[in-house]
Image: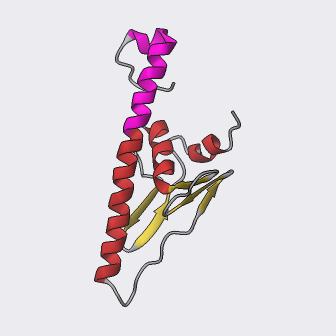
């Protein structure tokens, strides 16, 4: 697993420790991404309540390779909530807030930034990779 700033020699030299700690990092990123996504949806809903004459539409679906990210997610297959894209980018970037998150609602507009700190689309690379 890609674990930046490994805290133990086991993360570097014992694959089972590395995988276990990597799964913990992933779980933390997913939790943070879900909370961040919920905050973005709440900000969007609040904006629309405060601006009833000029509401902002829901963000369109975004395809990253075979993955499709949506406002509400899906029930399987390749349809995922935007929180999954946030978590994937966070795993590569260290947090959903490093640089800029995958998707964000600010000042009455949705924005997607699918590039990571190395200027490539990590979310696409993950989604387009076959196991």
- The secondary structure that dominates the magenta segment is helix
**Is 106 covered by the magenta stretch?**
no
In percent of width and height, residue 113 lies at: 50, 56
Q: Is residue 23 left or right of residue 32?
A: right
Q: Which residues are magenta?
A: 9-28
Looking at the image, is 15 positioned above or below residue 31? above
In percent of width and height, residue 109 lies at: 42, 72
Q: Is residue 127 left or right of residue 20?
A: right
The part of the image, by quadrant, that contains residue 130 is: top right
Decide if residue 36 is in sight here.
Answer: yes
Question: In the image, what residue occupies the spot 49% across and 14% down?
Answer: 16
In percent of width and height, residue 102 lies at: 48, 53
The extreme bottom residue here reads 53
Quarter holding the C terminus? top right
Looking at the image, is 115 positioned above or below residue 53? above
Question: In the image, what residue occupies the spot 56% across and 69% down?
Answer: 60
The front one of 56 and 117 is 56
Q: How is the image coloured?
A: secondary structure
Numbered circles on residues, count: 0
The extreme right residue here reads 130
Decide if residue 97 is in sight here.
Answer: no
The front one of 54 and 24 is 24
Question: In the image, what residue occupies the spot 49% across and 49% down?
Answer: 84
Question: In the image, what residue occupies the spot 47% across and 77% down?
Answer: 57
The extreme front residue here reads 75
In percent of width and height, residue 20 lies at: 44, 21
Looking at the image, is 118 positioned above or below residue 40? above
């Amino acid at each position: 697993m890609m674990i930046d700033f490994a805290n133990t020699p086991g993360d570097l030299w014992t694959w089972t420790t590395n995988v276990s700690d990597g799964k913990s990092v992933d779980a933390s990123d997913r939790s943070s991404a879900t909370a961040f996504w919920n905050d973005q949806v709440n900000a969007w809903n609040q904006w629309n309540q405060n601006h009833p004459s000029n509401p902002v539409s829901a963000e369109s679906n975004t395809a990253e390779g075979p993955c499709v990210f949506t406002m509400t997610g899906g029930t399987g297959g390749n349809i995922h909530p935007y929180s999954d894209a946030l978590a994937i980018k966070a795993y590569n970037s260290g947090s959903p807030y490093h640089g800029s998150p995958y998707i964000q609602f600010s000042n009455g507009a949705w924005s997607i930034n699918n590039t990571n700190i190395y200027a490539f689309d990590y979310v696409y690379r993950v989604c387009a990779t076959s196991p």
